[in-house]
Amino acid sequence: MQYLSEAADLRQSARGGQSTMNPLAQLLSPEDILLDVDAASKKRVFEEVGRLFERRHGLAQGQVVDSLSAREKLGSTGLGHGVAIPHARVKGLPKAMAAIVRTRLPIPFDAPDGKPVSDMVVLLVPEQATEEHLQILAWIAQAFADRQFRQRLRMCVDAAGVSRLFADWPQS
């Protein structure tokens, strides 16, 4: 969980100690949320996400899968407590894009605590993304560090509820 506290510190310092607006709310709609995905591995999750980004945003599924897989080879994006933030830079991407995924059953993700993952925010950013990319990652990590947030997330039964939870955090 050290990564989570470092991300929270980054979020605070990015705005001179003041908390930032919710950067994820601008990137997500309920159509970007996949619940009960039947996938037994990271690769299968990335394929499902690739299909979503292809259908919703015109990105090539293979490019999404390759980008996420390449980033994951550098080190796991699993945070612990059953959550992960798979993310990657994508050549030619005009703006940041995100999706939320919950797998039907938790999957191995090489998280620091060794626990499998079922809840993920997948973030794709332009190849040259810098500050915005870090702020979004920090915001997501801080949300996932909140035990009550994780519990509420797991109780959401539909995409609209998940979307509202993310849009309302930290007020929720």
Image (tube, rainbow, N blue to C red):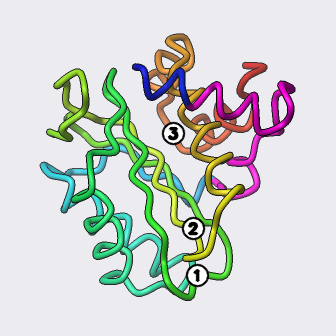
Q: Looking at the image, is mark 1 or mark 2 earlier in the sequence? A: 1
Q: Is residue 165 left or right of residue 39?
A: right
Residue 10 magenta-highlighted? yes
Q: Can residue 51 be found in the magenta stretch?
A: no
Q: Secondary structure at mark 3?
A: loop
Residue that numbered label 1 is attached to: 93
Mark 3 crowdedness (10 Å alpha carbons): few <14, some 14-19, many ≥20: few
Report the magenta residues as a range. 7-29
Residue at the disc numbered 3: 158
Q: Position of residue 157 (x, y in %)?
A: 47, 32
Q: Position of residue 39 (x, y in %)?
A: 19, 52
> In the visual, does 139 lie left or right of 76?
right
Precedes in sequence: disc 3 or disc 1 = 1
Type of amino acid under label 3: Asp
User: In the rendered view, does 25 fall on the left or right side of 34?
Assistant: right
Residue hosting label 2? 125
Residue at the location (59% across, 27% down)? 142
For badge 2, the amino acid type reads Val
Looking at the rendered image, the quarter that the C terminus falls into is: top right
Q: CA distance from mark 3 to mark 1?
A: 28 Å
